[in-house]
Amino acid sequence: MKRETKRTGVFTRRALIVMGGQVTVLGVLGAKLYQVQIAEGARYATMADENRISARLIAPPRGRILDRFGQVVAGNRLNWRALLIAEQTDDVNGTLDALSRIVPLPDHERARIDREVKRHRRFIPVMVREFLTWDDMARIEVNAPDLPGIMVDVGTTRIYPYSDRLAHVVGYVAPPNDNDVTEDPMLSLPGIRVGRAGVEKYHDLDLRGRAGAVQLEVNAVGRVIRELDRQEGTQGKDIGLSIDADLQQAVLNRLGDESASAVVLDCRNGEVLAMASNPSFDPSLFNSGVSQAQWVEWTSNRRAPLINKSTAGVYAPGSTFKMAVALAGLESRSITPFDRINCPGYLDLGDTRFHCWSRYGHGSLDLRGGLKNSCDVFFYEVARRTGIDRIAAMSHRLGLGTELDIDIPGARTGLIPTREWRIGKGHYWNIGDTIVSGIGQGYIQVTPLQLATYCARLATGRVVQPHLTRTIGGVLQPGSNPEDWPQLGLPERMLHSVREGMWAVVNEQGGTAPLARLADPHVQLAGKTGSAQVRRVSRELRESGKFDSSKLPWEFRPHALFVAFAPYDAPRYALSVVVEHGNAGAGAAAPIARDIMADVLTRDPANRAEPPGAKVADRGIRGG
Amino acid sequence: MSDRRLIRETSFDLTGKLFRVSWLYVLLLCALAGVGYAALYSAAGGSPEPYATRHVMRFSFGLVLMLGIALVDIRFIARLAWPAYAASLALLVLVARMGHVGKGAQRWIELGGIQLQPSEMMKVALVLALASWFHRASWERMGNPLFLIPPIIAVLAPVGLILKEPNLGTAVITAMVGAVMFFGAGVRWWKFVLVAAPVPFAAKIGYGYLHDYQKARIDTFLNPESDPLGAGYNIIQSKIALGSGGMWGKGYLQGTQGHLNFLPEKQTDFIFTMIGEEFGLVGGLAVMGLLALIVLGGMLIALRCRNQFGRLVALGISFNFFMYVFVNIAMVMGAIPVGGVPLPLVSHGGSAMITVMIGFGLLMSAYVHRDVEFEDRRDAV
């Protein structure tokens, strides 16, 4: 019994110790509760408010893109769409099956929806189908009880009234990728689009606007309980382009089926009035993602419909380059307008013979004659006397092979070779390279936009930069006045002798481009043809006399080029036409250039006053 | 005490036993369950469905079960101690092999439509087994280290299995309950020190074997704000809810955090947070007071028992309850890592309620039979 008593005693003592420990622990917990609820209570209470008030962004409508007369070339249209909120249905697949009995859901769409449902939290709506018709919507609403989790709402979608006619200029929008989203949280909203090409990309930030915010009371899974406050965002700004959309249509129509580019500039201020690249594509296809088949078709097409040939296509300028060579020669005084050079049909340099395009030669020519006949030997000799570096410097001044301030992303620079460039590549510069550069062949590469700019600078003597943006949010941007642009710094007489040569090419008996002559004798066009070889022609073949480039397979035929400005006596418009594999500039490009220029002069978009009233009337007359 | 009295008291009838039940203690339990009803009513957004009604039904069932067990002779229970332990251990092994995977852990087992959590049953069975073991131990045998080896194994085997499930919280609670049983039985202080000293080192090594989600719990416990939307979310949200309650709370059914679903698992593990948000510090302390009364009441029962088995059972059961309370409340206040431990009789959940009420039944049985004399070393083997 004594042992029992001892055991009891120990237990009692230790039980009391345990009880003491328990009371202490509970006391500490009580103190901790005091600390959390009272001492730090204010801090946590603030956090509680943040917790249930959540700011949501509302996407403003994207700014429109307008042509110079205010016609919408990229706008917004209401877009009825079906969204799926995964947390509101027990069976996502069942719901989608039921929905696909109402509106068809192709397999690749189902796969995309599955992916997005898995990626997002379950309360975030996932786009199931866009562009619902009224009938589809009615049928979805009627069947709503069988479609748990499906919600119909309205967003906006981008529309391009001119579709493929302006695709390369306006560009297109596409769903943002992950990189975009980190940069602007607004882009995580469903259905939002970012500019991916053209003006849509260049002015993306202005067009996008700033997101509005709405303060919502939400629960922890993000479901909205009620709206507390709303702040409207700023709408995206409208961008006014210098493009004349109707002229653009006409230009593209004139290009027909050719794989070609045509650029029309207001040569006094560099405004781009038309920039056509053929063939083109439908920009709205990018809106909801391009199908694999469509993409393969575009990228495998050798006429490259996705590439804006006007800014991203590079071609040897051929004989259109001769004005630059001439000016380089004139400025460096290696020739004068009156120096005569004899053309026997070839130029021998060491043991290499460079041929003129005319086998029999042009005889003795001055500068005007050299341009008029597009004599190769004449410009071989000018180039030889002037040297490549001076030619390159002059070309850059005139806008060739140099970066232009065009507001379209992805424009290429082209190339005018220099000694330094060649040596940098680990080669020597051969005098022969200078000779072929004299006729715009060899390493020289330029874009059609550069050619048009070059022509505009020749015509006006001002360093105009081609540009598309006239207004942002209705505010006129600098650059629409000729005085905004500096002088080229070349004496007027030098420019004049070159322009005179260009006039002779078209308007004088024996010029190389009689087809470019305008029907109205009071308005004269000055221009220059060019052909750019895409494959070297061997001497034997050329001398055999059997060579006929028009019999070559399409992709080996030379490109046909033409640059022009008009009217000759008071230059207003400059243009370049490049017909890929069109064979000869005089035959393929010159007539197109003539018709386009005639059309431009008739429309005279640069001179049209555009007060609001007159604008409407104009549109009526033109049937727009 | 006289022999006459002993005989009378060992042979009392059913009515006599009912009179010996501590109805005050039963009332405390009912009050706690009532707090649970009110909190679950609020957790459901002011509705008895889906939690509160079922809570009351479970508690009623548990209460009947508890009183039934309370009337069972403690000496009979003592005989069932080791069979119950063996059965629980077998279930633990079973759950390790084919358990239902819930929340990333194998903890549940289905037996005839009832979901069981063998680790919960194990704790009760372990209390019984250890009480039985130490009951028959004379004071002299307690001093023999070899005598302590079987009960140590009896503790470590289930602890290891529960760790493997993996359920860190329950494993720690089980080990603590076992340790307190050893303590109450009179194992010397220095022996505890000897066992406890290597624990920090073992913990460091053991950390490497933990599951990622357990490591994450420990890591986010150390710095919950490091991952506010991930693993630390529960703790931060719970503290926000508690803190926004202030002194008097936002009022019943007025808690914004809970009702807006910021509070995770508000009807189970985080029910105390809801109470703290709606009733403030005052309400939280009141509930803690009630819990303390139940814990200390259990300890008083242990002190009142005149047989070692009853004492140790009452000690083990009330300490187990205390550990539940401590882990749960410390967890929702962010004082210890989140452990998935409910607040007994308040949280929503069937299996835990039943095992807790079985435990209280044993506790009450110890109280009802507080004066019975064991025929030493025959009954308690």
Image (cartoon, helix red, strand yellow):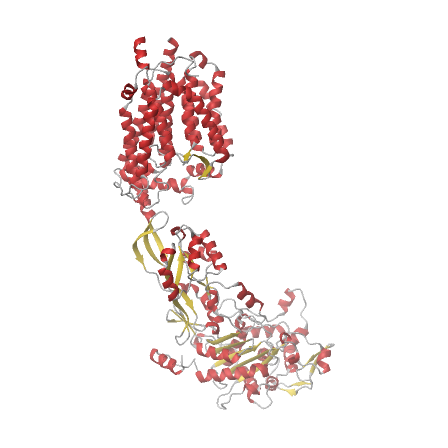
- In percent of width and height, residue B341 lies at 39, 34
Q: Quadrant of residue B266?
A: top left
Q: Point out residue A576 in the picture as x, y percentages from the top left corner.
A: 53, 78
The image shows residue A523 at horizontal and vertical percentages of 48, 88
Point out residue A580 in the picture as x, y percentages from the top left corner: 58, 76
Task: Using the image as rendered, state which of residue B278 and residue B244 is in the foreground.
Answer: B278
* Between A441 and A198, the one nearer to me in the picture: A198
Q: Quadrant of the N terminus of chain B?
A: top left
Q: Residue at x 55, y 89 (%)?
A: A507
Q: Nearer the viewer, residue A379 or A411?
A: A411
Q: Is residue A146 left or right of residue A395?
A: left
Residue B267 at least partly seen: yes
Relative to A45, is A301 on the left or the right? Answer: right
Identify the residue at horizontal 42%, vertical 51% (top origin).
A91
Residue A402 lies, with reference to residue B172, above or below; the image says below
Residue at 49%, 37% in the rendered image: B211
Residue A482 seen = no
